Image: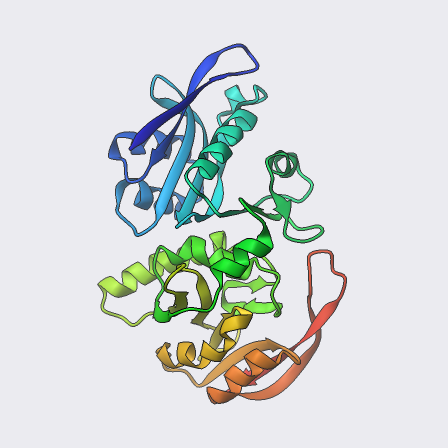
Amino acid sequence: MYESIDTITLKSGERVEAGVVKGPDPDWAEGIEALLEHKAEIWRWGNTMVLRGHPDVEAYFYILHRGGIPFANMSTVETRGVGIFGHVYTRPEDRRKRAAMELMRVMMDHFRRRGGQALYLGTGYDSHPYHIYRAHGFEGLEPHSGYMDYYSTSRDAFETGYFASGPTEVAALDWRDWPASTALFAGGFPGVTRCAGMRIFGRQSTEGPLLPFIRDASTRRTDGKSARVMVLRQRETTAVAGLTMWSFDSLWPRSCVVDVYCHPHYWDRAGELLDELELPGADRYLAYCDAGFKPKAAALSQAGFRASATYGQRVARDKARTGYVDVTVWEK
């Protein structure tokens, strides 16, 4: 579905139309796919899915176009107003005409009008795009981080409501969890070693790391295989309050890495998450935990893991590298 939003005057004086395409929309899919064809294959697949398929997620493509041919784009993928912002692109011949600034204004106004709650993005720290996003209300998750967030109220108000105690369900990963999970992994919650299998250490977006697992989950369902990623969903807000997954170790043969990470209010449900994860056959199962991080250590212990070794000063606690944490290897 296409909605015309505004008419934009570029720096060159040309007037063009700004609008939003809400997927799925096969009429606009080809033009948007052509505009974003430079993206890596996994992103092209994701765009095609939300433009031509019917995944359980809301996708918005904000575009500037001439006669129905897009030349600038910004996208959000959301679950109940919590989303990932990306695919910012203007054709080279149309750059330096304030297209990005004007389209950003249109997008943010529209996001607020339809009740959007939170957006997350990743870019280069202190880059030109970083400062464009800051001008529209985004802030870095922490000093020296290119990951940024925006809240229609405030971070504290949003997280208090979003992760409020309430009924939950353990379920296999699906599309709605892609944007929803970023609020958990970008949050300033305890735990640096969050998901070794997706290489998530410290605060960051799940935009890039999780998308291949979304595709894998679809394939596994079609093939009748058990899920390799399970989530703990807060039923009322659809927040991903916890996630667990398995992956084969890239170094040691027949070794399986098990990850689990939860919001502080939900670590008491981590055992249920781990119980629902069907593990593949392996000689050993490994898990990684910040040394001294008691909630995760307790969950691993209850699941039958035992601490076997500790790596000193293994991972930076933040992007500014103000300190490092020891990481304990757990094994069963």
Residue at (63, 52) in percent of width and height: 141
**Taking the image as drawn, is residue 250 in sight?**
no
Q: Which residue is drawn at 59% across and 87% down?
A: 307
* Depicted 74 relative to depicted 187: above or below: above
Residue displayed at 42% across by 68% down:
166
> From this viewpoint, is residue 29 visible?
yes
Q: Picture coordinates of residue 68 (x, y %)?
A: 33, 21
Residue at horizontal 28 percent and vertical 40 percent from the top? 24
Query: Residue 299, position in %: x, y?
Result: 51, 82
Looking at the image, which is closer to me, 207 or 191? 191
Number of marks in the rendered image: 0
Identify the residue at the far top of this view.
Answer: 13
Q: In this view, does 119 lie above or below 34?
A: below
Residue 185 position, x and y percent, is 54, 61
For residue 275, which quarter of the picture?
Answer: bottom left
Q: How is the image coloured?
A: rainbow
Residue 38 relative to residue 101: left or right: left
Q: Does 170 appear above or below 205?
A: below
Q: Where is residue 49 in the image (x, y as percent from the top left)?
A: 31, 46
Give the image quarter of residue 212.
bottom left
Residue 217 placement, left or right of 142: left
Question: Which part of the image, by quadrant, shows the N terminus?
Answer: top left
Viewer-proximal residue, 252 or 180?
A: 180
